[in-house]
Image (tube, rainbow, N blue to C red):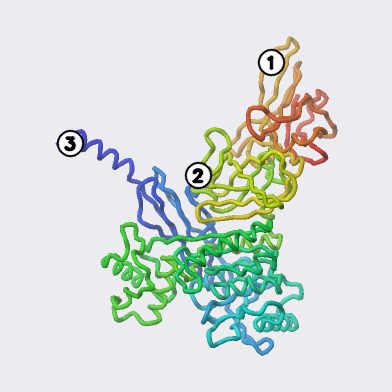
Amino acid sequence: MKLPLCSLLAAVAAAAQAVTLTVDQGFSSKNPQPGAIAHVFARQNTSTTVFDRWTGDVQFLLDPLAPYTTLVVPNANVQLRATYRTVSSWTARTGTFNNIAVTYYIPPNPLGMVFHFHGTGGTGAVLFQSSEFVSVTRDFVAAGFGVVAFDCLNRTTGQWDTTIAGAANSDVVRLNGIITAMKAQSIIAQDIPLFAFGHSNGGFFSHFSAQVMNWRAVAISSVQGSLAAATGGYSGPVMWWMPKNDDHPLVGQAGVATSLQRYEQIANRGLLARHIITGPMPLYPERFTRSAILTLQDSQEIYQLFKTNGWIDTNDLLTRNPNEGFWRSALPTRFTELMKSSIQIQLESTYTTHEFGNYVPHIIVDHFLRALGRRPALRPVNGASYAGDNVAPASIATIFTEALASGLLIGSSGPQAALGGVSAVLRSSGGTETPVRWFFVSPGQGSFLLPEGAAGNYSLKITSGDRRWSFPMAVAATSPGIFTANGNGQGVPAAAILRVSPDNNRSIDSPFSPTPAGFVAAPLRFGEDRLFLDLYATGVRGSSNIQVLFGNETITPLFAGAQSQFPGLDQVTFELPRSFANRGKVDVVIVAGGVRSNAVELNFGE
């Protein structure tokens, strides 16, 4: 039977859009059409495994290191696999320190100790029992941190003291008493770095107490943060995780807005800060297995109940706030109150109300590790070398950070502001903000053009949807970096060689050649010709004193300055000495204003 032409075309179009999203060792939302947003979830951490990263077609993911992330579905099949690290099983201990009951676990040779502060009405022990809190605690321990929790003094309301600032605060007194006792018993080292992590009221106390505790870093969720700490009482790095639909009477939508104000106050002081607002996510059939209390059969039954009653839409998003309790009476009688409490936690996390969900543990861990210097400081770097403590005015700079953009987007006609919804300003120490123009943005990296005339200390403040970052940075007159063929600041330069024959004929050569492992330095041969090398760099033009270190020689370039065709790009041109024939591999470094660039490699044959 022949189909009508219109039906045939429709069938072809439908077939072209019939893509699949396959997730191994994790879960996903329904397979949407290309161009729509899909959600992927890793399995919950266990006592012996913690989530590591996604593998497979990770180029499509917003954040390949996040146990929960999203992707814009391409017009192609996508295969993803959640991978996990095997860790040693451990058991939380209980002890009494300074007459205070404490739940804790300290691994051998801990990098630091994370004090985990419970929310209103909670207890320290619950933080080692509730599935979502246990999951993030396992992430901390897997990263090498000890974790400690105890109860606030006020057991009437179960709230931490956030009214009295300073060492006289009753809960700070208890906190310091525990630390002193643990050190006296040699459970922790005298100089161990201390961190604060808290949810809700515990998050507020984490930030509030930073004024006297001087935590190495603070991470908080579902809370505004302390005004006094944000405006001058604390100078360490702070990060927020905020649920988009927070409905707590003391936080709510006004609190989410206030948390943004606190973030801005910290960012405007030139400090490192990160702020994330997570929106609702689909209710997938396996969601409730994140709790050890509920089986896969339980989870699928609950999902089907919500689907049958129309409590989730066609994209599996909840249509009502689960805190309204409409779903409780519809559950079969076999579901106990404990099971219902676990269901409540997962529903609230799905709808992103005030409940904690372990969605950004890798960012919290990264936040703490960078505060220790275990990872490089978060700041913009030279866009060619990906290194250096400073960047230069009118140069190309790069920032590496998580979940910057949903995909690779390139400015169609040079650098542009608000590329793909990612915007940024450069804020001076005096408070002047200058818009930044992007060359490109991608999920983990973006490159931008520094304004001319910039000098001194700044903050790069980036906004991408509901994610915000503030990175301290310094702008110096020069910060030279050489672009490389492999795009990583190492190896052979992305350069051109002008070959001039004795009869003045000219041709262009390349100093690199491709291999399956990337570009390598190609053997350069003089013959009878003169060779002139054009190095492409950035951060050079700010000095009139520019030299090239070429092996064991110092060469004054024939030209060094701005390359006229591409914003931020510099060019350094010099003649290659014939005496280097047969030398093999030689390092090349640009020195601009006394500052050295990355070393690149040339290879001289016969």
**Between discs 2 and 3, the one toward the N terminus:** 3
Residue 261 visible: yes
Question: Which residue is depicted at the point 33% across and 67% down?
Answer: 303
**Residue 200 vertical position relative to residue 519 in the rendered view, above or below:** below
Question: Which residue is depicted at the point 71% across and 74% down?
Answer: 212
Residue located beneath label 3 in the image = 3
Element at label 3 = loop
Residue 151 in the image: state x and y as whole percent.
59, 83
- Residue type pointed to by label 3: Leu
Disc 2 crowd rating (10 Å Cα; few below 14, some 14-19, many 20+) is many
- Residue type pointed to by label 2: Gly
**Residue 159 vertical position relative to residue 398 in the rendered view, above or below:** below
Residue located beneath label 2 in the image = 420
Quarter holding the C terminus? top right
Q: Residue furthest top?
A: 503
Residue 580 in the image: state x and y as whole percent.
80, 27
Residue located beneath label 1 in the image = 506
Q: Quadrant of residue 178?
A: bottom right
